[in-house]
Amino acid sequence: MHIKRPRGWEIPESHATPESIFLNRRALIGAGAGLAAASLLAPRIAHAAPGARLYPAQRNAAYTLDRAVTPEKYSGDYNNFYEFGMSKTVLPAANALKTDPWTIAVDGLVEKPFQIGFEDLVRKVELEERLYRHRCVEAWSMAVPWTGFPLSKLVALAKPTSGAKYIRMETFNDPAMAPGQRSFLYPWPYVEGLTMAEANNDLAFVVTGVYGKPLPKQFGAPIRLAVPWKYGFKSVKSITKVSFVAERPKTFWEGLQSAEYGFWANVNPAVPHPRWSQATERVLGTEQRVPTLIYNGYGEQVAGLYKGLEKERLFV
Ligand SMILES: Nc1nc2c(c(=O)[nH]1)N[C@H]1C(S)=C(S)[C@@H](COP(=O)(O)O)O[C@H]1N2
Ligand SMILES: [Mo]
């Protein structure tokens, strides 16, 4: 028997075989032929990167840049992903990251804790593309077309109770897969957090893709955060757990070196890092130094979040 059938990632979702028909067809096929047919049909999702058929997503024109998009050949080969090593060249090691299947646990102060598969989560939201600046605390920067959905959508799905004051996000912890996690010098797993007001700000974005395709592994596949008004370390990669909590979470970098890397970490050119200036940044690709902007240029959208919090270390 020969079945010519386009694979899942070659056809738009609306044209894909609905699951009910797929299941009926399997039921109709006799046991002997059925085994062969099932083995042809079953891997159609496993071979595609999760959610691949959804790309490229519609660009949201509200998010514009003051600079050119950084070509992927620069941004995709200069990453911070300590789980796979402390150098910028984590691309080969990050290939070991297993992203399929991928489950995200939602727990803490929510109506009802649940686990959700990455594919199921993506089906519940609408993906869009946004051009965002990214400013690492190390004073390099890039401009990237992320694909994803507002973090506020995930908050709404989670249904936090009134006691939830912070959202805490965690990366996988798997030293067998990620060699960096065999080092006891770091407080694994990587943890980050935001206040509920920050999480519900329009700019806070859950990222599933970049450059019009699913996230390559070194960018933190299959699902990460982008909070562009904060230093890059707040944008946690490869998220496996989202918890709603009453107390401010202790973040990974805070646990290592709280004098240099705090909870708030809002970009501010006037507040130097203890060991270097934050006044300018090196743009990946062009290698030019350009002035750094307060809140990385997003002050209009986010400065209001910090009214009344002036006593906090907002820029560390
Ligand atoms: N899990 C995890 N998330 C992480 C990091 C990391 O080492 N591990 N590095 C952070 C830092 S310092 C930066 S600048 C960005 C880098 O994202 P990129 O490599 O996609 O440019 O990811 C952030 N998220
Ligand atoms: Mo960073």
Image (cartoon, rainbow, N blue to C red):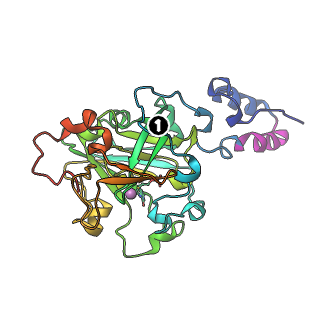
Image location of residue 89, percent across then percent down:
54, 64
Image location of residue 102, percent across then percent down:
52, 49
Q: Of helix, strand and loop, which one carries label 1?
A: strand
Q: Which residue is mark 1?
A: 148
* Residue 201 placement: quadrant: top left
Extreme-right residue of the structure: 1
Front residue of this view, candidates 273 and 228: 273
3 shown above or below 140: above
Front residue of this view, candidates 146 and 296: 296
Q: Main secondary structure of the magenta part?
A: helix
> Quick check: is 34 in the magenta stretch?
yes
On screen, residue 111 versus residue 54, left or right, reads: left
Residue range of the region highlighted in magenta in the rendering: 30-43
Decide if residue 265 is in sight here.
yes
Q: Residue at x 34, y 39 (%)?
A: 204
- Which quarter of the figure is the C terminus placed in? bottom left
Q: Residue at x 82, y 43 (%)?
A: 36
- Which quarter of the figure is the N terminus placed in? top right
